[in-house]
Amino acid sequence: MYALAVVAAVATAAWWWIIRMPAPSFHGPTSEDVAVQAAVRAELAADVQTLAGDIGERNVVHYDALRAAADFIDQSFVKAGLRTRRDGYDADGKLCENIEAEIPGTNSEVVVVGAHYDSVLGSPGANDNGSGVAALLALARRFAGNTGTRTLRFVAFPNEEPGYFQTEQMGSWVYASRCKARRDQITAMISLETIGYYSNTPHSQKFPLAGLGLLYPTTGNFIAFVANSSSRKLMRRALATFRAHAQLPSEGAALPATLPGVGWSDHWAFWQHGYPAFMITDTAPFRYPYYHARSDTPDKLDYDAMASLVTGLEHMIRDLLTR
């Protein structure tokens, strides 16, 4: 019996090391960080308001709003000095478009940063996923005019939500499929998914498996990096760089793709096409009280935390572009 207990303890420790990246998860802000993040915060708040407040619910049922969101994202890329490409496809008789802004690198490898711009039926989608799109646009502004060894693509996808979720009519599926057909050498895909809600209340963080609460914080004040096992190496490297620059607590996990929540965004589509990818998220339904609800409105989000996240991601992406 004792031997079995020892084996179980060793196995648990080994599994913990595989899924969780132990290290100090953040550092304190500098005066320079504070100044930069004030500008980022203002951008994030304005863009979430445009998407979830002014445009509102946006999906194939509310098609005019979906098109308005696509136009807003396209125009935001152009205003940042980027050239856009709108890659369309048919979904139930409606033209839906992936919106891409590319910054060419010096070799053929590609890093993709993506976020879906549709919202679920019945919700204005401030956090899900106006927050991810706002971060995508903020990052695009900071990389415009820069080049790296690898090509950088910012892509906004439609049709992530039900009833297109994990089907071939997801915008990200269409995009990843066309990349595969062209033999694009995508070395990393980063999905920005529901990133705007944080809580310092004890036990505000839930998990898809009860045992994960023994390994991870049960206070929902951190950002999560989530990968499958084949993308574990990429995620660990990205998280290490993020932590070297971030002011936001962070946790990383490489988990089976079948576990609830692990594949619940556009990174899933890239996994299906053999590309390494991971999701960055506040964990959505495992924390956010207004998930998929009419109450998912811009006033619910923590724009200071989101600004800290964006500044950390900028450093992380620069590292992924150069080696």
Image: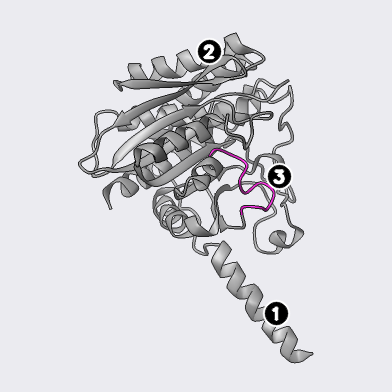
- Residue 67 marker: 2
Give the residue displayed 50% in from the left and 40% down from the top: 191
Q: Residues within 10 Å of mark 1 (few under 14, many from 20)?
A: few
Give the residue displayed 60% in from the left and 31% down from the top: 160
Q: CA distance from mark 3 to mark 1?
A: 27 Å
Compared to residue 93, the image places residue 151 above or below, namely below
Q: CA distance from mark 2 to mark 3?
A: 30 Å
- In the structure shown, which secondary structural element does the residue marked by tag 3 occupy? helix
Q: Residues within 10 Å of mark 2 (few under 14, many from 20)?
A: many
- In the structure shown, which secondary structural element does the residue marked by tag 1 occupy? helix
Three-letter code for the amino acid on which mark 1 is drawn: Ala
Q: CA distance from mark 1 to mark 2?
A: 53 Å
Which secondary structure dominates the residues rendered in magenta?
loop
Three-letter code for the amino acid on which mark 2 is drawn: Arg
Quickly name the residue at label 1. 8
* Residue range (magenta): 257-266
User: In the image, residue 187 lies at what x, y percent?
Assistant: 37, 48
Compared to residue 47, the image places residue 307 above or below, namely below
Q: Counting residues from the N terminus, which is met first, the one under dot 1 or under dot 2?
A: 1
Q: Residues within 10 Å of mark 3 (few under 14, many from 20)?
A: some
Label 1 vs label 2, nearer the camera: 2
Tell me, yes or no, whether the highlighted magenta stretch contains residue 207: no
Quickly name the residue at label 3. 286
User: In the image, residue 124 lies at what x, y percent?
Assistant: 66, 20
- Most extreme residue toward the left is 106
User: In the image, residue 146 lies at what x, y percent?
Assistant: 24, 34
- In the structure shown, which secondary structural element does the residue marked by tag 2 occupy? helix
* Marks 2,3: beta carbons within 8 A: no
Quadrant showing the N terminus = bottom right
Tell me, yes or no, whether the highlighted magenta stretch contains residue 265: yes
